[in-house]
Amino acid sequence: MASEVDTAPRTAARLLAAGASTLGVSVLLDSAMEHYRGSFRNPAMALPLAASAISIAFDGSGRGGGFPRTASHSASVAIGLTGLGFHTFNVFKRPSGLTFNNLFYGAPIGAPGALILSGLLGAASDRLSGDGGALGSGRLLAGLAAFGIFGSVGEAGLLHLKGSFQNPAMWLPVTIPPLAAASLAVDAMTGVPRPWTTALLGATALVGTVGVAFHAYGVSRNMGGWRNWRQNLLAGPPMPAPPAFAGLAIAALGAVLLMRRARG
Amino acid sequence: MSADDPQQVPRAKGGRAPDVFEPGGWVPMRSHSQDEEVDFVIVGTGAGGGTLACKLAEDGFSVVAFDAGPYWRPLEDFASDEHHQSKLYWTDERITAGANPIKLGANNSGRSVGGSTVHYAMVALRFRPEWFKARTRLGYGADWPIDWQEMWKYYTEVEQALTISGPINYPWGPRRPRYPYRAHPLNEAAKLLARGAEALGIDWTETPIATLSAPKGKAHRCVYRGFCVTGCSTNAKQSVLNTWLPRALTAGAEIRDLAMVGRIEVDKAGRATGVHYHREGAWHFQKARNVVVAGYAIETPRLLLNSACEQFPDGLANSSGLVGKNLMVQLNQAAWGQMKEEVRSYKAPPSLTISEHWNYEDRGKDYFGGWAYMSQGPLPITWVKELAGQRGLWGQRLIDEMARSNHNVGLKMVGEVLPDERNRVTLAEETDRFGLPIAKVEFSYSDNDRAMMKHALSFMDDSLAAVGATERWKEWDDTCHLNGTARMGDDPKTSVVNADGRSWDIPNLWVCDGSVFPTVGGVNPSLTIQAIACRTADRIKALSARGEL
Ligand SMILES: Cc1cc2nc3c(=O)[nH]c(=O)nc-3n(C[C@H](O)[C@H](O)[C@H](O)COP(=O)(O)OP(=O)(O)OC[C@H]3O[C@@H](n4cnc5c(N)ncnc54)[C@H](O)[C@@H]3O)c2cc1C
Ligand code: SF4
């Protein structure tokens, strides 16, 4: 079955790149909107936009290689880490520090994590396009994707708690993706991918996609609705955020593919 | 006079009432003829009357609720203009007297379907449990005939109905269930209260507040423009107008707007038979099996006194002589200062953070009672009036001060005034446009009030100093809220109504509003008024089931 051995890593690499760029688009638009809302008060607030934009260019093209790609992915990771620091500082400098209110309305601590993940997934995709190395078994990547999904669940959970789960659909991202991530994490540990996991990851990708529509509806429920889009896009639920789930799920499907191949 | 001016022409008529969630919208409304003896006539549709109308209608009683004010649709009728919005206030002539006459109108009484809650500041607080037994437990005022545990249940019901946005954990008092919606983001004024409280080593929290932090049905969430006390044009504010009353209509209640009740009729047997009301230029009479007065602490005693008749020459429900007495405002003094950085305190609802420390801490006080304090955000006209009236600025100095009002920061107290029979509502000789004697309102601060003010002002001033505010000054004279004047109790000799709001003298005459408070505590009253209304409804249902109405 030489042909399978040949195509699986490539397909996996494509899925990872697709996942990384979906995640990157989500980060780009989300941070653009949020940092615009924050009037780019700190010049560093432009960095995640630049980093995600360049990464998307590389991940999306699927071509080229070598230093520029690696540098771009490393920059994403570095800027993400810096962002984590800034956002944590922003939360803690508010009265009483680590409180729910500050987590709700301070800079979102989890958001820069998505930039780190997009950098790591992009780099992994490059690696697989080459010799694959230790990533070839897919288990490490599955673990990373599971971790990423859990992180996004935490973020969605916090923000949906802020919105008091006022619409039942707000429970979707805190029920389906965690199941997918848990199932994926088990598979990563055992090295045995189960059909369940694939189905749940598919459902997670779907949640990430329909989430955009739900958030669009959420925007319409603010005063003035879509007629007042310039204000309500910023005041309503962030439309670019849900695709982060789709990106992570797609990347995770790449990892599953690698695991399947490793088991023959 | 335009045909669709809600201040001139009643809207709730002909089987329909305004839909508050749709510009130009209508909802069906059940209508009753005047000859039909309805189960309940309710006078006033504010925190007490509106809530009760909803609950009684949902329990299957026939209800007609009257309000002297218009039936607004906030989305189309409210402007972002302080002056224009004074149309929400009760500004009919009243005489105000005493050593410290109360300023009546904007800051204490509304005239609208929905009552004063249409322009209230939405702060939604529970009493400290001991206040329900203030006399026995704390040694002042009077005991309520109701127990705090029972009230806790009704508070929860109201918090759910109004979808209160509040903190995850409330720092004071017994445990309470999680607020339905999460707290709002803090504006700069709110953060400055928090930092001051931290510096002084006391707790603070996000204020539980009746405006939405997320959408609810057709109501939008808050847009943080801060026009709350002039009426909220987004429906984010959870007033009686857009919470209890839509439910009341659905359950079959009838609401009559622009309908001023002038007199309650009592028959020879000493039972109320209905009310005389003025609407569309003429007086009418609505028959009823029960009459509930819910016009707030000035209009309620005024109506009871104005309804004096042969059997009850001193006014209805007044065998104790207490109708109109024990009027309690709340102290609303403030400390102000200037910050170097911009604060823009008027952005967002005015009181997003609070400390109830001095409601729950009794040590270190040389007075009775409690007080809370909250961050502030006065709108420009209110602010210019305070600067001119309280601080004595005029001319160029006033202009200069207004020019830097973006840097202004303030803290305002809500403080407990003790019941005192000398503070009271009586009838004046003069009459209003309906020919009804107007109310005379007398109020004077007591030594206890002054001691509380002194402590609160100096504490709030310390808090401002701790965050670096300069040019600090104290506003010594302001009051808010009106309560008392028809107090509830266990003894017909020392109270006007019993725990159910039922008058001791006339068994089918009830009071359900802020007037029934024996004491006011150091928190804003509307949540307690609504909780009492819910309790009254439950009691009426139980009494009716036993044939005891
Ligand atoms: C500016 C402002 C801010 C406030 N902020 C807060 C706050 O943050 N938190 C809080 O808890 N409370 C607040 N309050 C107080 C709160 O609004 C009142 O305590 C509460 O609404 C009183 O309820 P009520 O039912 O006794 O009277 P109201 O709500 O005033 O209702 C009385 C109604 O009766 C009608 N009426 C009176 N007499 C007659 C008659 N004879 N015939 C027909 N209709 C009549 C009036 O038109 C009015 O609509 C505020 C009040 C104001 C004015
Ligand atoms: S700040 Fe919020 S509650 Fe106040 S008027 Fe505006 S939308 Fe309404």
Image: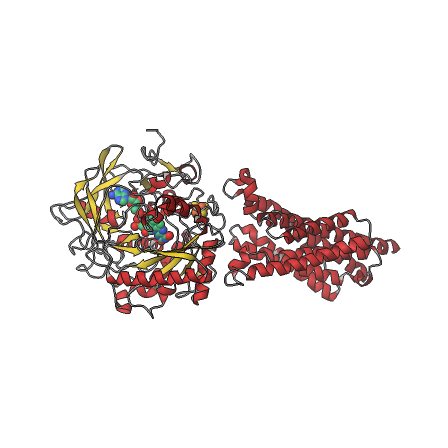
Name the image quarter holding residue B430: top left
Residue B445 place in picture, x, y as percent: 24, 57
Q: Is residue A99 left or right of residue B2?
A: right
Residue furthest left in the image = B310
**Is residue A5 visible to the viewer in this orientation of the structure?**
yes
Residue A72 place in picture, x, y as percent: 75, 54
Residue pictured at 52% horizontal, 62% vertical: A99
Residue A155 place in picture, x, y as percent: 60, 57
Residue pictured at 48% horizontal, 60% vertical: B168
Q: How many marks?
A: 0
In terms of depth relative to the viewer, which is nearer, A99 or B135?
A99
Residue B142 place in picture, x, y as percent: 24, 63
In terms of depth relative to the viewer, which is nearer, A42 or A51?
A42
- Check the image and tell me how it is coloured: secondary structure
Q: In the rendered image, which quarter contains the N terminus of chain B? A: top left
In terms of depth relative to the viewer, which is nearer, B338 or A257?
B338
